Image (tube, rainbow, N blue to C red):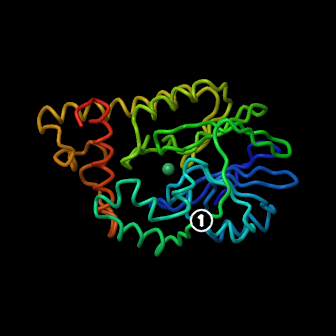
């Protein structure tokens, strides 16, 4: 874990990168009651943040494992002072709901996913979490964050705008190497593209993401445009593949359209990656009205 001081009160918590969706960066907001937004850097690092900075409250932006597996632990550790994106509370509350509403269950992945989440990653169902959501302004001691709806990556995915510091925390919009991710069946490409447009509305001097380094002012327009370009490149490649292979998503998997053809992951991940690739491709087919 690295702590990167952004302003006198805001620190970027850079989580270790593992490649297996169990960590994410976050923001530590100092004040009389310090708040940690996301920042799942693993249990030991979370303990350190709580002890060193007196973290009082924790906020989680969406239900994906890398942003959610610490929630149960933080509820215990912070005596319940945890809030999650309101629209996704049911997913945090129940892994069964998560599995039933993402396509995992319908595609035979319930057992594998439960093994990963509850077994390897220590997921705890968290019905006791409080909620926050878009339109709210979170008033902290010396910072205020407007909560912004950025759906597409997940239905209730949110980001934050800090107008005084001109910091835009775009969370999981895809500023990392993989780019935009929309691999569950409830993801919508149309919403994703609208969320990318939304990011352009903020005159940010610093753009933050959950799995990437901060982007500074001059590079922000290019970084936002890059998100759209990545989706467009995938879209064109998929449309070209459809001409050759037809529009059945299953026939378009393993063609290097989303993941490289030689992509290898250890058990139990191959079945999950296969599902993700097919689901990402389906989102494009749906967008092109071919699905
Ligand atoms: Fe995510």
Q: Which quadrant: the N terminus?
A: bottom right
Is residue 171 left or right of 230 when viewed as pictured? right
User: On screen, 152 above or below 124?
Assistant: above
**Residue at figure coordinates x 35%, y 54% from the top left:** 103
Q: Position of residue 230 (x, y in %)?
A: 39, 34
User: On screen, 81 above or below 201?
Assistant: below
Is residue 130 left or right of 260 when viewed as pictured? right
Q: Residue furthest right?
A: 32
Residue to which mark 1 is pinned:
126
Q: Position of residue 120 (x, y in %)?
A: 47, 73
Crowding at mark 1 (Cα within 10 Å: few <14, some 14-19, many 20+): many
**Helix, strand or loop at mark 1:** loop
* Count of marks placed on residues: 1
**Residue at figure coordinates x 55%, y 62% from the top left:** 93
The quadrant holding residue 150 is: top right
Q: Position of residue 76 (x, y in %)?
A: 69, 71
**Residue at figure coordinates x 28%, y 29% from the top left:** 288
User: On screen, 54 above or below 177?
Assistant: below
Question: Of residues 78 and 28, which is closer to you in this image?
Answer: 78
Q: Is mark 1 within 8 Å of ligand 1?
A: no
Q: Residue furthest bottom?
A: 119
The quadrant holding residue 239 is: top left
Is residue 287 left or right of 165 when viewed as pictured? left
The quadrant holding residue 75 is: bottom right
Q: Position of residue 291 (x, y in %)?
A: 24, 37
């Amino acid at each position: 874990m690295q702590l990167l001081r952004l302003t006198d009160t805001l620190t970027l918590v850079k989580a270790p990168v593992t490649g297996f969706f169990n960590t994410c960066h976050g923001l530590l907001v100092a004040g009389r009651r310090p708040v940690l937004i996301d920042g799942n850097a693993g249990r030991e690092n979370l303990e350190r943040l709580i002890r060193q900075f007196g973290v009082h409250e924790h906020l989680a932006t969406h239900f994906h494992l890398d942003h959610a597996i610490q929630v149960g632990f933080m509820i215990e550790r912070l005596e319940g002072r945890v809030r999650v994106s309101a629209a996704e509370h049911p997913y945090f509350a129940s892994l069964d709901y998560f599995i039933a509403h993402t396509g995992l269950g319908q595609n035979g992945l319930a057992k594998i996913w439960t093994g990963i989440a509850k077994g390897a990653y220590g997921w705890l169902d968290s019905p006791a979490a409080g909620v926050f959501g878009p339109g709210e302004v979170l008033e902290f001691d010396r910072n205020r964050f407007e909560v912004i709806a950025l759906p597409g990556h997940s239905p209730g995915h949110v980001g934050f705008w800090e107008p005084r510091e001109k910091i835009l925390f775009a969370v999981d919009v895809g500023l990392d190497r993989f780019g935009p991710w929309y691999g569950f069946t409830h993801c919508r490409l149309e919403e994703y593209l609208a969320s990318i447009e939304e990011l352009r509305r903020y005159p940010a001097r610093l753009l933050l993401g959950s799995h990437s380094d901060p982007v500074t002012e001059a590079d922000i327009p290019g970084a936002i445009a890059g998100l759209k370009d990545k989706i467009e490149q995938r879209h064109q490649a998929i449309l070209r593949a459809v001409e050759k292979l037809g529009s059945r998503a299953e026939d378009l998997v393993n063609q290097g359209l989303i993941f490289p053809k030689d992509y290898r992951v250890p058990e139990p991940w191959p079945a999950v990656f296969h599902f993700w690739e097919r689901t990402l491709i389906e989102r494009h087919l749906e967008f092109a009205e071919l699905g």
